[in-house]
């Protein structure tokens, strides 16, 4: 009989992270939920436990290295080993260059990029000692170009994708698989603020199913949905003379 998998989800309080918690709870998983929103992950953990699952939780702000280390140490204490670690914490702030604030940019990068870096620093020694493990970092299909109003988000996700790619190449020899998760548009509190049409908008539970299956298959990149993947590939290689005017008036500044 296969043992239950031990999974930690960093950024599990809402959206994709919360949906992943419920998705994994349906598949014989021991969970640790980490988030700066302790009240939200407590509710999720208690609901999972009430339905016969097993979930622990601990407050963890990925902008603070000590909290990340404490959260991952707590996970090892509760689970013994970590089979899968999903680094999902992410924020987005609408930023127009006409009113650009460097501190807002830094805030986004602190969570979306440095949060993954802090988690990797803590996870790698644990998984090297185990001799196995999967680390899935959530980036975005928005990592291919600089989109209007999203300078911090796009830049942070591009950096996160490159970081995860480097980790994937280097850590394979230790039995550690690194997966880059690149969703398109998923209905969350973050995307609810968007002022433009979002093609193939997915519900979080659908996204969570795709992510879990992709991680299980050991894919190096889990990107979806197909239509948006194709659109971003076109955007990536579009010449500036075509890309710039097409995107310049995509959203109106307030």
Image (spheres, rainbow, N blue to C red):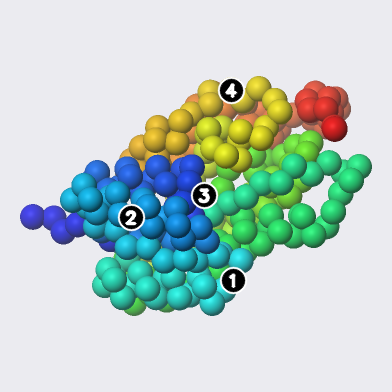
Residue under pointer 2: 45
Q: Position of residue 22 (x, y in %)?
A: 33, 45
Q: CA distance from mark 2 to mark 3?
A: 21 Å
Image vertical order of residue 236 relative to residue 37, above or below: above
Q: Is residue 136 above or below residue 224?
A: below
| Mark 4, secondary structure of its residue | loop
Mark 2: secondary structure: helix
Structural crowding at the residue carrying mark 3, measured as other residues with C-alpha within 10 Å and reported as few (<14), some (14–19) or many (≥20): many
Q: Earlier in the sequence, mark 1 or mark 2?
A: 2
Number of the front mark, 2 or 3: 2
At 85% from the left and 32% from the top, the residue drawn is: 253
- Neighbours of disc 2 within 10 Å: few (<14), some (14-19), many (20+): many
Q: Residue at x 35, y 69 (%)?
A: 75
For discs 1 and 3, the disc positioned in front in the rendered view: 1
| Residue at the disc numbered 1 | 64
The residue tagged 3 is 138
Residues at marks 1 and 4, CA–CA distance in whole angstroms: 35 Å
| Mark toward the start of the polypeptide (4 vs 2) | 2
Density class for disc 4 (Cα within 10 Å; few <14, some 14-19, many ≥20) is few
Q: Residue at x 71, y 28 (%)?
A: 195
How far apart are labels 1 and 3 at the CA level?
19 Å
**In the drawing, what numbered circle is on residue 199?**
4
Residue at the limit of the structure toward the right, as seen here: 98
Alpha carbons under labels 3 and 4: distance apart = 20 Å
């Amino acid at each position: 009989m296969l043992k239950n998998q031990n999974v930690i989800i960093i950024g599990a309080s809402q959206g994709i992270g919360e949906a992943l918690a419920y998705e994994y709870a349906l598949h014989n998983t021991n969970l640790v939920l980490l988030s700066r929103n302790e009240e939200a992950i407590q509710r999720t953990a208690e609901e999972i436990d009430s339905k016969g699952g097993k979930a622990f939780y601990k407050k963890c702000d990925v902008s603070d290295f000590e909290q990340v280390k404490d959260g991952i140490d707590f996970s090892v204490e509760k689970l013994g080993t970590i089979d899968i670690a999903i680094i999902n914490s992410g924020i987005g702030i609408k930023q127009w260059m006409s009113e650009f604030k460097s501190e807002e940019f830094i805030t986004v990068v602190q969570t979306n990029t440095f949060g993954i870096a802090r988690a990797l620093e803590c996870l790698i020694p644990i998984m090297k000692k185990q001799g196995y493990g999967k680390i899935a970092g959530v980036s975005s299909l928005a990592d291919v170009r600089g989109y209007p109003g999203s300078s911090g988000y796009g830049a942070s996700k591009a950096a996160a994708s490159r970081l995860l790619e480097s980790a994937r190449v280097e850590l394979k020899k230790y039995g550690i698989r690194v997966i880059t998760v690149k969703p398109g548009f998923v209905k969350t509190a973050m995307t609810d603020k968007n002022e433009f049409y979002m093609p193939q908008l997915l519900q979080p539970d659908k996204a969570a199913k795709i992510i879990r299956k992709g991680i299980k298959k050991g894919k190096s990149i889990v990107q979806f949905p197909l239509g948006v993947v194709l659109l971003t590939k076109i955007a990536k290689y579009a010449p500036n003379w075509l890309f710039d005017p097409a995107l310049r008036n995509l959203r109106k500044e307030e």
